[in-house]
Amino acid sequence: MRRSRADVVVIGAGPAGLAAASAAREVGARRVVVLERDERAGGILPQCVHTGFGLRRYGRDLAGPEYAGLELARALKSGAEVRLDCCALRLEPGGGVRRPNAVVAVSPAGLEEIRAPSVVLAMGCRERPAGSLGIPGSRVAGVMTAGTAQRLINIAGIMPGRKAVVLGSGDVGLIVARRLALEGATVAGVFEAVAWAGGLPRNVSQCLCDFGIPLFLGHTVAEVHGRARLEGVTVCEVGRDMRPVRSTAREIACDTLLLSVGLIPENELSREAGVPISPATGGPLVDECGASLTPGVYACGNAVYVHDFVDDVTTEGEIAGAAAARFALGESGDRRRDGCKMFFREGRNVRFVSPAFVRLGRGRAWPSLALRSRRPAANVTPVFRWEGGQCSGPDLEFVNPGETIRLNLPVEVRGLIESDTRRDVTVEVSLESQ
Ligand SMILES: Cc1cc2nc3c(=O)[nH]c(=O)nc-3n(C[C@H](O)[C@H](O)[C@H](O)COP(=O)(O)OP(=O)(O)OC[C@H]3O[C@@H](n4cnc5c(N)ncnc54)[C@H](O)[C@@H]3O)c2cc1C
């Protein structure tokens, strides 16, 4: 096995990993290596040929491959090494600058181990597969995730079918429904079990309404039919118990069923390494700099939580990469990592909060919180509660589970962060209807 050393190893060359690598080099890390298992860099972006990327960052409406190209060029110009066809297999945490972490990876050149004081986890997320839904029927061809269909059309140039049904209304499903329609296929409808769309309102409008594709809320696919290839599906309304109501069943002839039923941060590697994972997001528990609770291990992008916009992924990648480099260069010692923390806990109508914690003390950065609601609600007040106190943030007109909310911390919570508290503090964040 080949062995080498670096200051920072980044796992994943999506927008998060590329931004982390550029920032790590820009703050002075000497050797920064990015490991990417795919044959191209850019993560999910090369298959997203639609526009809508980079409005905030570049002030331009870019297609996914264009955005990826800019970020890759920046990483290469910074001097980071981007290794393609190179899959990280294992992370062995070391514990600090004197005992670096080890990453074991495999590429066509064989196995190698890279030791580095800092590792940035930027593995993105993957789609929930068909098996996790347990829909009755045989394992026919033509049932696939929406992202697989997107890759087939936009990268391999293959149409997955001519008449499709989409189960789940996540952003990927909405975007691929439009893509199929643009290529001349029929999309019979998008079926969503809950009473609201899972994706961004702009995608419901631009991908479904503009193309006359119906959205059936409170519906699901109860059965798939066909022998070798999918021939049709049975759709039903969903009852209060979230089960299909059989009396409402109807059949739709189709050759393709696309699943857009959730994204899961990709963290097998992190779990095996013992990096603490948030049950709310499925990603590592990180602070406002992307530092996990494992010394020298940082995380960013969709590996932490599923982001709406790539611009935010890039910004958080830069913050994590710069912090990882400073740690590797000994500019933020192990000592500071053991200080007291403020943990954020999900309260009423909150699915997750990120960052999961901040370190307490004077001069700390006050992060804005990213959170998602569990249910849609109008006229909502964000409420922060801790032992012995509570305060509220500015009211929100509407919250939607498909859209990330960004909240600035109220002055009372910022005061707690700067206080001389000698113990950890837990702050519960709720979204309360007025
Ligand atoms: C279909 C779709 C449409 C979208 N549309 C928009 C849009 O219009 N506008 C917008 O702003 N945002 C959009 N987004 C969101 C944005 O693209 C993502 O938030 C962003 O790509 C996440 O970046 P990432 O680097 O965290 O993850 P990814 O882009 O998923 O990159 C992760 C990388 O890590 C690699 N990797 C994983 N494990 C390993 C390993 N063990 N070893 C080596 N490499 C590994 C993967 O191969 C991948 O290349 C869209 C996302 C999707 C899925």
Image (cartoon, grey):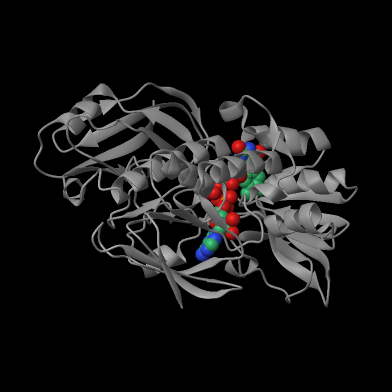
Q: Is residue 189 left or right of residue 261?
A: right
Quadrant of residue 97 in the image?
bottom left
Residue 309 visible at all: no
For the point 51% across and 46% down, which residue is it? 79
Residue 58: % across, % down: 60, 28
For the point 18% across and 45% down, which residue is it? 336
For the point 58% across and 63% down, which residue is it? 37
Q: Is residue 186 above or below residue 56?
A: below
Q: Is residue 359 above or below residue 158?
A: above
Q: Is residue 116 left or right of residue 133?
A: left
Residue 206: % across, % down: 74, 33
Residue 172: % across, % down: 66, 48
**In which quadrant is the C terminus drawn?**
top left
Q: Residue furthest right?
A: 184
Residue 268 visible at all: yes
Q: Is residue 140 left or right of residue 17?
A: right
Q: Nearer the viewer, residue 337 or 176?
A: 337
Q: Nearer the viewer, residue 350 or 236?
A: 350
Residue 362: % across, % down: 17, 30
Q: Nearer the viewer, residue 135 or 32?
A: 32
How many circles with numbers are drawn on the protein? 0
For the point 44% across and 50% down, which residue is it? 304
